[in-house]
Image (spheres, grey):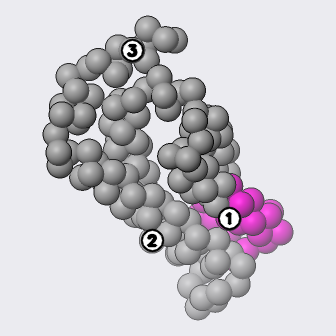
């Protein structure tokens, strides 16, 4: 594993990002924009499931928001990998980074299951409401642990 982390950190792209004054901040900004798209659209569907915006069916909201969520997810993942490449051994050793990855995986599984159900049920049910609460908890955990990476190591 250490060899893989070293290889990632010594890649040309990682060296380019470290050497540039402007690339890292732009990649970081792209990561934040992606996070905003993902979490913003997921929260929008969660609050619809809780009963806000009843004039829009849950299915219609899920269908409308999904392309924005997926775009944000792709942007977040690509930018996150680029940011990780700058200091892979340090990030991999950081407990908050590892926690973020676990919470992210759980949040993505929950989001996938919740969206799948929302695409087939026009009105929220108990399972969707539990999924929406779980979503808010997990995504908050992803955001907090991600932010804490800079302060824990």
User: Which residue sits at x=64%, y=65%?
Assistant: 118
Depth check: 45 or 62 in front? 45
Helix, strand or loop under label 1: helix
Please tell me whether the stretch drawn in magenta is mainly helix, strand or loop.
helix
Depth check: 2 or 102 in front? 2
Foreground: disc 1 or disc 2: 1
22 is within the stretch colored magenta: no
Residue placed under numbered mark 2 in the picture: 64
User: Which residue sits at x=56%, y=85%?
Assistant: 56
| Circle nearer the N terminus (1, 3) | 3
- Mark 2, Cα crowd under 10 Å, few <14 / some 14-19 / many 20+, is few
**Quadrant in which the C terminus is drawn:** top right
* Above-or-below relation of 147 to 36: above
* Residue 39 - label: none
Stretch in magenta:
113-138
User: Which residue sits at x=60%, y=88%?
Assistant: 53
Q: Is residue 150 at all visible to an observer of this figure?
A: yes
Residue at the far right in the pictured view: 126
Residue placed under numbered mark 1 in the picture: 136
- Separation of disc 1 and disc 3 at Cα? 35 Å
């Amino acid at each position: 594993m250490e060899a893989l982390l070293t290889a990632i950190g010594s890649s040309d792209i990682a060296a380019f990002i470290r050497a540039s004054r402007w690339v890292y901040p732009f990649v970081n900004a792209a990561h934040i924009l992606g996070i905003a798209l993902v979490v913003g659209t997921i929260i929008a569907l969660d609050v619809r499931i809780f009963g806000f915006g009843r004039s829009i069916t849950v299915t219609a909201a899920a269908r409308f928001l999904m392309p924005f969520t997926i775009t944000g997810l792709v942007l977040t993942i690509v930018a996150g990998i680029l940011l990780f490449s700058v200091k892979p051994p340090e990030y991999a050793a950081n407990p908050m980074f590892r926690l973020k990855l676990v919470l992210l995986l759980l949040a993505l599984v929950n989001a996938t299951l919740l969206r799948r159900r929302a695409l087939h049920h026009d009105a929220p049910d108990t399972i969707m409401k539990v999924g929406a609460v779980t979503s808010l908890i997990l995504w908050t955990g992803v955001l907090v642990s991600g932010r804490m990476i800079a302060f824990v190591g």
